[in-house]
Image (cartoon, rainbow, N blue to C red):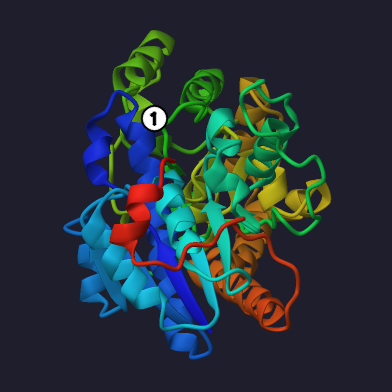
Amino acid sequence: MRILLLSLQDENQDAAPDGSTRARVRRLEEEQTLALVRAMRDGGRLAPLLVCLKGSRLHERARALNLPLLAVSGTGTGNPLTLLRLWNRQRRHKKLLIQTVGEEALALGRRVLRMRPSGSALLAHAFFLRPPAPERCKSKEMRAARYILCGSKHVQNRILAAWEQAPDAAAPVVPPIVPADALPLLPPGICLEGFDPPSPFREEEGRHFIFGMGESLAPRSGAQLVARAMAAIWQRDDLPPWEVRMLGGGPRFQEVLEEAAALGVESRLCLLNEQYAPDVLRNCHAWLAPGSSPEEAPETLWSGFAAGLPVICSRSGLHLERLGGPDQAQNAALTVEENDPQALAKAMIEIMQDAGPRHRLAQCGRALAPSTGLQHMADQACALFEAWLRALGTGAPAPAEKTPDTREPAAAQRDESS
């Protein structure tokens, strides 16, 4: 079962005005891509080939892992050498799944599909964190795909909403009927390596109770909400000494620091920037995930579970989805309403004062940890890929371009206008 996985992330784009957001998305897509290729290679049933940008970080990491690899020099469809190499690779296989990761690979994925005879290939896309822009959702590249893997219901709903919008007069009409299995959910995983069980908190030892928090300077992370919750509890004398350690880089460092200073809690706050999370979490006693962003990185919530810490998180739609719904969320974490510093402060006090909830939530976290990892995500994806390829082999209907082009790329490119 042959799979061509196109992942063309370019870290040079991280210098753009929205570079911090791009960097978060790129890092996540890079981790998911490597996990997918490793799982397919090691599983033995799928034969992957990773296509990535030459000289990129993904290229270097894939080469170090000795993964099946084809490095190309551009993301577009106008590079004759790239097209020739892809044409030469794909033409050997009777059946092929073309899987792209991220927006950068959409055009090249469709171009490879056009090289194939009708009915011999499937095109699938994957968006783990952010959906494409609405106009991109209506593009030829998106409409050519049979499946679109969605990292969350937010991604799924945004794509469906873009398809349902009335198209412009000059735009091709998107089919109003979407197959039920066309947008399957595939939540992203995190790397579980390096996380060690933390030492339990013992107040009699005079240690600080340490709260940890990840991706703290990202948009809608809840960092200022935490500062306000800190202000609500910092004068209480019935609590052990405590502090909050915030991980993650971003443009909001000064903003968060000034908020903490204005509230008088800067002495209890450590802004650690980018750090290796397992090193920090083994010294923490609880994990905070108060954010409300539907495009939050999975580490923001899952790191606490991976480390076996009690987790306090907001009842955001994304958190409830990742925890399996409201009922399961109540068992796995101490949940609080979004944007409510008083509720967050109350939860922080409860975790510090009561060892019972701490131990119960820590046990739940350890039980959930395996399902948050990259391997779990990759196993789910491989099961989907095998089912898709079996359906392709039995002649199940799959969309194809109207005029599949099996000519050599140099000749075909002259006729390609889009």
User: To which residue does mark 1 refer?
Assistant: 217
Q: Is residue 19 above or below residue 212?
A: above
* Residue at 52% from the left image edge and 83% from the top image edge: 94
The quarter holding residue 241 reads top left
Instruction: Please state if 390 lies on the left or on the right of 326 as rendered.
Output: left
Q: Is residue 249 above or below residue 107?
A: above
Q: Is residue 154 above or below residue 279?
A: above
Q: Count residues near mark 1 (Cα–Cα under 10 Å), then give few for <14, some for 14-19, many for 20+.
A: many
Please name the amino acid that badge 1 sits on: Leu
Find residue 105 and report its horizontal and vertical position in percent. 41, 51
Find residue 326 and report its horizontal and vertical position in percent. 80, 46
Instruction: Please state if 138 lies on the left or on the right of 409 as rendered.
Output: right
**What is the secondary structure assignment of the residue under circle 1?**
loop
* Residue at 63% from the left image edge and 78% from the top image edge: 389
Q: Is residue 347 above or below residue 6?
A: above
Find residue 408 and report its horizontal and vertical position in percent. 34, 67
